[in-house]
Image (spheres, coloured by chain):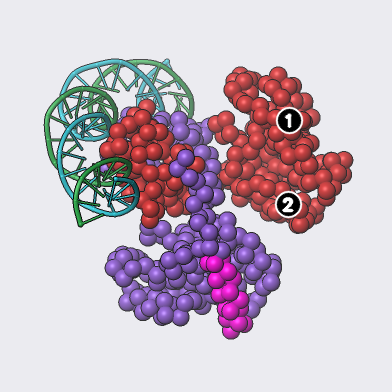
Chain colours: A red, B purple, C cyan, D green
Amino acid sequence: MSQTVDRALSILPLLAEGPADLGRVADALGVHKSTALRLLRTLHEHGFVYRQSDQRYRLGARLIALAQEAMENLDVREIAHPHLVRLNESCGHTVHLAVYEENEVLYIDKVESRYPVRMYSRIGKPVAITVAAVAKLLLADLPEGERRAVVEKLDYPMYTARSTPHADAFLKELATVREQGWATDLGGHEESINCVAAPIRGADGRVVAAMSVSAPNVVVTADELLTLLPLVRRTADAISGEYSGRTPVKEVTA
Amino acid sequence: MSQTVDRALSILPLLAEGPADLGRVADALGVHKSTALRLLRTLHEHGFVYRQSDQRYRLGARLIALAQEAMENLDVREIAHPHLVRLNESCGHTVHLAVYEENEVLYIDKVESRYPVRMYSRIGKPVAITVAAVAKLLLADLPEGERRAVVEKLDYPMYTARSTPHADAFLKELATVREQGWATDLGGHEESINCVAAPIRGADGRVVAAMSVSAPNVVVTADELLTLLPLVRRTADAISGEYSGRTPVKEVTA
DNA sequence: ACGAGCGTTGCAAGTTGTGCAACGCGGTAG
DNA sequence: CTACCGCGTTGCACAACTTGCAACGCTCGT
């Protein structure tokens, strides 16, 4: 791995926490200021960092644009979107679509609740991986070895009393989820919010994404939300069918 | 500027166009495959690229998460959002918020139209800089020198017959916009879509962002849309006031 | 079973990145 | 008003890091 690039890339997560001046960046990297300067300059030329009027650096616009393109290239997303909208129209709650990638689960699409009380979440935000219903589905489908490895490395923050407390409990939960083919999060992340989720599978049966419906207690009880499970599963299956139906690859090696 | 980092960063826009294999990346960079491999590996370790099952590389999840954080750090956005929502509730049309940064204008927030016919756009997407109403406002406020430089370097694609045809016309338009303090795009990007926009200013009077209301002809005529101008300007002014009112800086050098 | 294509590895050569020290500038304190 | 301090910036010599090469292993297609 390349040291220079490694250092340069390390700057980005740093700036994500907020703007920083040259000295702070150099310190954080453990390099000389002149070195940090040159790295920042290179990042700047590519538009990945932006120098604001007070001379401090923050993340740049190109980064946002790139991420946008990255998401638009996800085939599942495109196929799933109309289904998510339809589901939202019939139940009114927030609908999420998420994928797993390299130890992270993140939302790649969302349709907002039509109720005034909405849950907070944002496309692109990594989800609470140890409790979210969609995360359970995605992790449950990983091959045994990788699943164990990932689960062991996770932190288990107790967002609420119902959060998954530790790796063992999580593995058990994942086994159950895998068995039944759907998952829930009943107040494990936010005390008053429940979710039901179902997996979206590719042609080979592997889970490629997961979708969920979320609603706060004040709108519907957990039991009421669970009555939506069949609908959620049917939607997920419809997406699976469409996704695995035609080849997801659009380019040919011409 | 660092050559290695420069090359590594060049890979990202490349992958944004779609997944690519090692050979293609190496060719595009004009370097040996082994070099490209090492760069990709470094990018991979940071989660900026992801290696899919067919071994090809595509943009990774961390990129999306980072961009998300980048946007959440934009102060204007946070302040403006509730105002945008309120504006949308009172007129029903699509509302956009955009900023200028380094030769690009991009949407950083959006509230969807409540009409069934919606215009296409996405947060994070660079806007058609030569025709969009928000772009005119943002460019019109640049210092003379920089404005000329930017305008000269732009391309002027004729999206429609009403698109800005060349730099001279654009400079004239920018002068007008600067004078009147608001801008429009009447079918300059999509034949049937019109926008009215107003600037959001910081404490020093400089334009820090711009907001617009957009609607297709089939919903309201251009004239009808123009009647919303006072409301749009009032909203923009309200955001300006709130933005310049208190210090946007939240951190202290502890 | 054989060959072609692709990703991967170790190595030697030298290009490139690095840290140092010194400079210029702006703001602050005396 | 001046002197100082902090910060970003530059040029340079050294050496570390990256680079391209060539050879290997693998999978896929014939």
Residue A252 visible at all: no
What numbered label is drawn on residue A182?
none
Indicate yes or no whether the magenta region holds residue B143.
no
**Residue B221 x, y percent position in the rendering:** 61, 81
Query: Is A131 left, or right, of B241 in this rendering?
Result: right
Label 2 resides on the chain identified as A
Crowding around mark 1 (Cα neighbors within 10 Å: few <14, some 14 to 19, many 20+) is: many
Q: State the residue position of label 1.
A: A163
The x, y position of residue C6, in whole percent, is 40, 31
Residue A118 — which label? 2
Between residue B44 and residue C30, name the one nearer to us.
C30
Q: Chain of mark 1?
A: A
Residue drawn where x is 86% and y is 44% of the image: A221
Pinpoint residue D25: horizontal percent, then vertical percent. 40, 16
Residue range corresponding to the magenta coloring: B221-241
Residue B49: image location, x then y, percent: 46, 37
What's under tag 2, amino acid-wise? Arg
Secondary structure beneath dot 1 equals loop
| Residue B118 as seen in the image, left or right of residue B177 | right
| Element under disc 2 | loop
Query: Which quarter shows the N terminus of chain B?
Result: top left
